[in-house]
Image: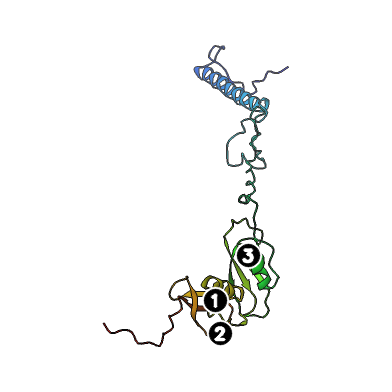
């Protein structure tokens, strides 16, 4: 049986050995310790489940990354929602529940009469098309209004012709009502009291709806007696 020292290095403590043999043994022991330390480090990395991979140029090759999971105790963010706006409600109708009547599509003269029956004012706005029907109103049909509110009636066609009535010698207030009935409007030259002594345009003249007629109202001029006034 042969021993492992094939080179047959002699040590200083052996018979016939020298001091260099001791030095070789010390170096051999140090190399063994270094190898054991490296093996231990590698074994520790394997036992750690690759939690700390080795560093180096190729350390990340072929290794995928995974996003960290959200801790189970942390609540997931909730989506922010916006409540829908509250529906807009219409303004309450004035006392009595009066609204603009459904006059769209009717003859403008009939629409005017219906507004008057509801004690509402009116304003006729004639267009450039054709026909006498009401296309729209302002305020719109169904809008809550108060008595006396003026409603604009938008007519499809132009203002039609109308004959000026004879108002001479009529009471001024009665003459004004007759003009409005015919679609005309009075103007007053000398006030609204008394009888009509003059009008412009003249009776039986041709005018158009919404045209004004100027009235001169007052007392009838005294008839001359035919006798000369006494000389003072």
Cα distance in 3D space between marks 2 and 3: 26 Å
Mark sitting on residue 154: none
Provide residue 127's location: percent of width, then percent of height: 61, 77
Provide residue 182's location: percent of width, then percent of height: 61, 76
Which numbered disc flags the more N-terminal residue, 2 or 3?
A: 3
Please name the residue shown 64% across and 51% down the image.
96
Q: Is residue 187 left or right of residue 142?
A: left
Q: Alpha-carbon neighbours of circle 3 within 10 Å: few (<14), some, or many (≥20)?
A: few
In which quarter of the view is residue 167 placed?
bottom right
Cα distance in 3D space between marks 2 and 1: 13 Å
Would you name the residue on which mark 2 appears?
203
Q: Nearer the viewer, mark 2 or mark 1?
A: 1
Q: Nearer the viewer, mark 1 or mark 3?
A: 1
Please name the residue shown 59% across and 57% down the image.
147
Tell me: residue 103, above or below residue 22: below
Please name the residue shown 54% across and 19% down the image.
26
Would you name the residue on which mark 3 appears?
116
Viewer-closest of 99 and 187: 187
Would you name the residue on which mark 1 appears?
170
Provide residue 55's location: percent of width, then percent of height: 58, 36
Circle 1 — which element? Answer: loop
């Amino acid at each position: 049986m042969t021993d492992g020292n094939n080179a047959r290095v002699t040590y200083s403590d052996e018979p016939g050995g020298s001091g260099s043999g001791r030095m070789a043994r010390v170096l051999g022991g140090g190399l063994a310790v270094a190898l054991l330390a490296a093996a231990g480090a590698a074994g520790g990395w394997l036992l750690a489940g690759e939690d700390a991979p080795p560093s180096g140029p190729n350390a990340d090759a072929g290794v995928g990354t995974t996003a960290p999971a959200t801790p189970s105790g942390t609540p997931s963010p909730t989506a922010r929602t916006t409540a829908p706006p509250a529906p807009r409600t219409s303004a309450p109708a004035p006392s009595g529940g009066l609204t603009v009547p459904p006059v769209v599509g009717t003859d403008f003269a009939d629409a005017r009469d219906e507004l008057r029956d509801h004690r509402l004012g009116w304003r006729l706005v004639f267009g450039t098309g054709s026909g006498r029907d009401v296309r729209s109103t302002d305020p719109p049909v169904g809008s809550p209004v108060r008595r006396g509110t003026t409603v604009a009636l938008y007519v499809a066609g132009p203002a039609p012709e109308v004959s000026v009535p004879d108002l001479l010698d009529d009471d001024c207030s009665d003459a004004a009502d007759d003009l409005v009935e015919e679609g005309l409007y009075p103007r007053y030259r000398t006030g609204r009291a008394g009888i009509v002594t003059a009008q412009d345009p003249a009776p039986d003249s041709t005018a158009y709806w919404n045209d004004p007629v100027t009235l001169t109202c007052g007392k009838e001029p005294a008839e001359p007696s035919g006798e000369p006034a006494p000389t003072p």
